Amino acid sequence: MMRAVIYLLPLTSIFFTIADGKRILPLLQPQPLEFFKVNATQNVGSCTYTVSIRTSCSSTTYTRDQISLAFGDAYGNQVYAPRLDDPYSRTFESCSTDTFQIKGPCTYQICYLYLYRSGYDGWKPESVTVYGYYTKAATFNYNVFIPNGVWYGFDFCYRRGSASA
């Protein structure tokens, strides 16, 4: 039994990494979520989040697709940005990083994040990092093309009470 513990400990470092004081969530693949409920009424709030999205160098040169974002905590607090894209300002070009200020309800530690893409160009984000005043930065590593017409991302929440995601 002691050998099993010794062999499992090195594996835990594969799933969680801490760098520069930022919490980088598990290095797992994003998943589609068919029945994601966006709570747009929660967006009236007193907290501002900085969201940094790095587009992969292997993404399309640019995208005209509509990109939406939703993230939140294990307590049902959700922040929703219905449209981040702007093809006229060169948003989401390959090898670029775009930063957004998003207002929403104050959350506890962010533990889920989903992206939604609608269009025909395609888009491959490398990572999304959310910075909040009351929370540690949370980085979600994608590095895959986002499918069209479905919420796609990560949920690492241990639900407490009722959650909307």
Image (spheres, rainbow, N blue to C red):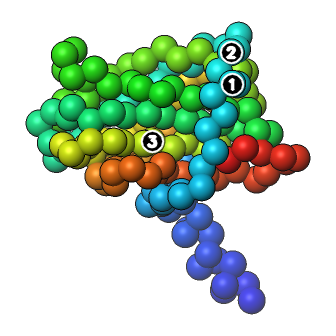
- The residue lying at 72 percent from left, 44 percent from top is 164
Nearest the viewer among 83 and 131 is: 83
Q: In the rendering, at what x and y percent does residue 77 appear?
A: 73, 32
6 left or right of 51?
right
> Mark 3 or mark 1, which is nearer to you?
1
Q: In the rendering, at what x and y percent does residue 110 appear?
A: 65, 36
Please state which amino acid type lies under the numbered disc 2: Val
Mark pair 2, 1: CA separation: 7 Å
- The residue lying at 16 percent from left, 47 percent from top is 58
Q: Which residue is mark 1?
A: 41
Which quadrant: the N terminus?
bottom right
> Mark 2 or mark 1, which is nearer to you?
1
Q: Which residue is mark 2?
A: 44
Near mark 3 (Cα within 10 A), the count class, few <14, some 14-19 or many ≥20, is: many
Mark pair 2, 3: CA separation: 20 Å
Locate residue 108: give its quadrant.
top right
